Structure formats: C-alpha cells, structure tokens
Amino acid sequence: MSDNNESRTNQPIDSTISDRRTVLKGLGAAAIGAPLLASRRTSAGAAYDTYDDDYGTVIDVTDKGADDTGNQSVSGLVQGLLDDNGDDTLLKFPQGEYYMDEQVSMSNFNHVGIFGPEATLVPADYHNFTYADGNPSDMQLFSFGRVDNCSSNDLLFQGFEVDQTADDTGIRVIEAAVNDGLEVYEIDIYGRHDSGTYGPGRFNIRSSSGTGIVDNFRAPDGAAHVSETPNDGNLWRGPTGIVNNKHVGELTIKHCTIKGFPDNGVYADDGDGKRIIYGGLFGTSATAALRIGGIDSVVKYPTIHIDTTRPNFQKPGGIRIEDGTNVLVRDATITLDAAHEGMQGIVVMDACQSATVRNVDISSTSSEAIHGIVANPGCGPLTVEDTTIDWSPAGGYGVWIKGESSPANVTLDNVTITDGASVTGAGFREGIRNDREDTTLTDVEVTQTSSSDRHALWNRADHSHVNGGTYEAQKYGILDESGFTKYDGITAKSQRGNEGVRLLDASHDIQIYNSTLYNGIRDDGCAGLDTSNNTIK
C-alpha cells in the first residue's frame, strides 16, 4: 500500500521517560545532531494502553456506542465525547473501521489525545461530507485549536490509517493550531485524494516558545489536480500534502512520505518560526517537494525523487527556499528524472535572507532542460559546500547564480559537477553560470565533456574570485566576460583542443595566476590581462 522504504514501526522510547513534554522539548536540538527519538508506538495493537496513565479521563469510543464496522458515522458521537469531557481526555479507537461524514472540532483545550493504533478512519466522499462554514474546500475530519487568539496546548493524535480509496474522496485528516505540545505520530493515508479539497495535514505552533512534531505522516498516493475533481473552480491547483503556514514556534516534520500533490508537497513557509524537516521520502509535487522558510530552519536527510511527468504540474522541483534567515539544507539526496522543462533541484528565492546548502547530492537524467541549484537575483548570501551535482539532463546549468547587481555574495566551496549527456537546442550548456558580483568559487571541480557545446564555467560577473579547482569541458573550460576577476591556482582544459580559458571582448582587468592552462588563453579583446606563474600544457 505504501512504497515508503523506511520502517513503519517505531522503536520505543525508554520506559523511564514518562513525561512526553520533556521528550518533545528535546527533539529540536536532536534534529541538528543525533537521530531523533521515536514515538512510543511499537507495533500495531501492542501499545493500546500506552497513554492510559497520562490522562485523567480515558474513553474507549466503542464503549460509548461508536460503530467500528464502518457502517454508521461516528462523527457526532466523537464530537459529543470531546464536548462533554473537555481537557485532560484521551479518546481511544480500538481495531476497526470508523466512518466519518462531518468535522470533529475543539477550539480551546488543554491536554487532549486521539489514539487509534489499529483503527482505520473512512471519510465520506465529497458529495456526502458535511463541511463547515459553507466552504466545500474545507473538509476535515479533525480540527483542533485556533490560529487567531490561540489558547490550546498539548495535543496527541496518533496511530490511524485513513482509507480514502473511494472515488471523489480526499480529506484534511487533521488541522491543529496549538501554542505548545503538538504530537502527531503514525498516520497512513491510502488512496488518491481526488475530491479537490484541502490536503491531509495542516500544523502550526502559535507560541514562539512552543514546540511540536509530526512524525511518520504518510500520504504516498498524492492527489488529483482540482480541475479533475468535483471541487473544480473552488481551489487553486489542488491540495498540498502538509501545510505549516501560520507558525511562530518550532515544528519538526520527521520521516514523512508525501508524493504527487498538485500544489507543494510540504509547504513550511510564512511566519517567523523554525522548521526542521528530518528524513522522509518526497516525490513529484507541483512547485516543490519541499517549500521551506523561517528562522534557523533545517532540512536534513530527505530523499527527493521527481520521477513522474503529470499534466497541470508546472515545473515541479526539489527544495524551494522561499524566505527566511539562516536556512540550512544538508545531507539531502535529490533526483530529477521527470520530463518537466525548467525543473530545479534547489532554488533560493528572492525573499530568502541567507541560506546554506551542504553535503547534498543532486542528479538528473531528464529529457528536458532543467537546473541543479539556482540562486535567484534578490536572494541574500548563499553558501554551497561539499555538494555533488551529477548532471545529465538534455540541458541546463548545474549551478545558476543570478543577480548582476546583488550586494549579497554567493560562495561555492568543494562543489563537484559532472555530466553524461549531450544538450538539446534549449541551450543552458554550462556547468556553472555566474551572473553575480563578488561570487567566490573555491576548489570547484566541473567536468562537462559529453557534448561539444558545453563549457565548465561561464563567468559574467565582476569582482569574482576563482580559487583552485578544475574546469574541463569539450568547448572551453572557462568562458569569461567579466571585470576585475581573479583566477588563482586553477586548472582549465578543453577536450577539443581549444584554449582552456577564453576571454571575450567584454572582459577587462582579469588576473590569472599560478594556474595550469591547457593550450593557454584565447584573448578576444580583454582590456587589461595580468598573468603570472602559469603552466601551459
């Protein structure tokens, strides 16, 4: 049912840990270093009494008359149990199927749990679900807390499978806004979301000191574009997998599987909070598999594979760093194999104040022209280090640094770009295209030898610094039309026997020192060329 190759069974937390809040508070720091602690779910049915001692009121919903055969709706009964018992209440769903045709909600609460380690929720289809506030897009099974004037804390939601395999069925399983203490574990959603309504999860921490975790939330079957659904005309594009957009605290999204959504896979943007996306499997979603923003946010260990070509999906990509400050993407694997022209492995948008990409592997065999890493013109300082781009699409830059007059510098350090395919008439032939002043390339290795049209580096920006590294391509290793750029300790080579470096007539005040240049330099009119201590081979 799921193609998640991570274990569906979490390891138990040490039995001496009785305070879940203490565990939760430590998750954010753990995400930066050691692997995170797992939830206390062990295997299906084995932990049904795990939380009984944590709540003042514990209710088995079938003891109160809930139908566990999927024949009668339990929505009204569950809503009544929450209304009647309020805070410090755990509702437990034993093994069975629970049909729901209306939203269950709590606006203000403290310490509430919904737990069903072997339970299956069966939402009504689009035509039979009673939605709130007259908005057909806003269908959801559970809604907890309020984004505005939030006064809710401590929510546990764990252990359900959601069966939306029926036609015209797709539901927001849970929407939660709490100040602190959000815990969502082990939610498996099966069946394509083809109702055209909001996607399966929305989570927001509303206090700057609050924390939360969404762990093993899986929706591998994706969703239909809204134009293919009964809700056509009421939603733009269609659902997003996970939404985190009114957030000021810290949220960890761990080991989730999100694939095939016509909007973003994960939208963790807007608000000044911190997001930690840890591990997980992410597939083709329109715009981006992961869209990230915030302060000190981290994307670590995800696997992203864009391998499906779908109509109505405009330029699906890997990671989109939308905004924020000090955003870190590290230890990620991104593969772009779909035939979608213009895809990008990682794109840093204009609103991003600063970002770092570290130890990332990006590869592609797409039949379209696409790009590996793109820095948009307005983005702040960007550092890319210890990263490999294995680049074999039909065209496109391994790295494209935009922004001719941007005051923010870009640094590439120990970046390796290789290619294995020829380019089409679409162009975009260089391993690296640099348009931004004050860019620094240190120990960069670019090999672009599969096509006669390729260059390793096209430098168009003044005051650039290229220190060490190897630039080898079929046509020219380096193509320069900048001013006041210094090349120091580089190796430049043309596989066709051309000069390793070509200086166009727009270039001026160029320094090339201590370098190994195969067949020397082709000077097409550089005004002011200074060379020293170079080796010509």
Image (cartoon, grey):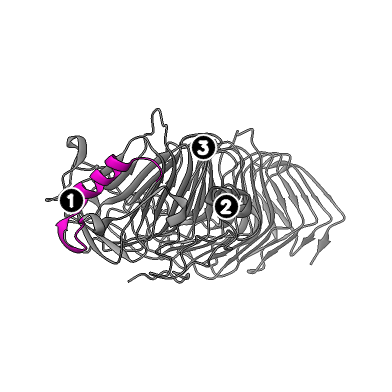
- Give the residue number, with chain letter if any, for mark 3: 350
Element marked by disc 1: loop
Q: Can residue 207 be seen by looking at this rendering? A: yes
- Give the residue number, with chain letter if any, for mark 1: 101
Question: Looking at the rendering, which quadrant does residue 111 occupy?
Answer: top left
Q: How far apart are marks 2 and 3 (CA)?
A: 37 Å
Q: Which residue lies furthest to the left in this view?
A: 127
Where 117 sits versus 204, above or below? below
Where 267 sits versus 448, above or below? above
Reading the chain from its start, which is encountered first: label 1 or label 3?
1
Which of pointers 1 and 2 indicates the residue nearer the eye?
2
Looking at the image, do the residues carrying marks 1 and 3 touch, with CB atoms under 8 Å apart?
Answer: no
> Which residue lies at the image location 60% right of the left edge and 34% below the top edge?
406
Reading the chain from its start, which is encountered first: label 2 or label 3?
2
Where 451 sits versus 356, above or below? below
Q: Magenta residues?
A: 65-88
- Residue 508: say if magenta: no
Question: Looking at the rendering, which quadrant does residue 407 occupy?
Answer: top right
Residue 381 horizontal/vertical position (percent): 63, 40
Along the line of sight, which residue is nearer the eye, 342 or 314? 314
- Give the residue number, with chain letter if any, for mark 2: 23
Q: Give the amino acid type for the residue marked by disc 1 in the picture.
A: Asp
Q: Give the amino acid type for the residue marked by disc 2 in the picture.
A: Val
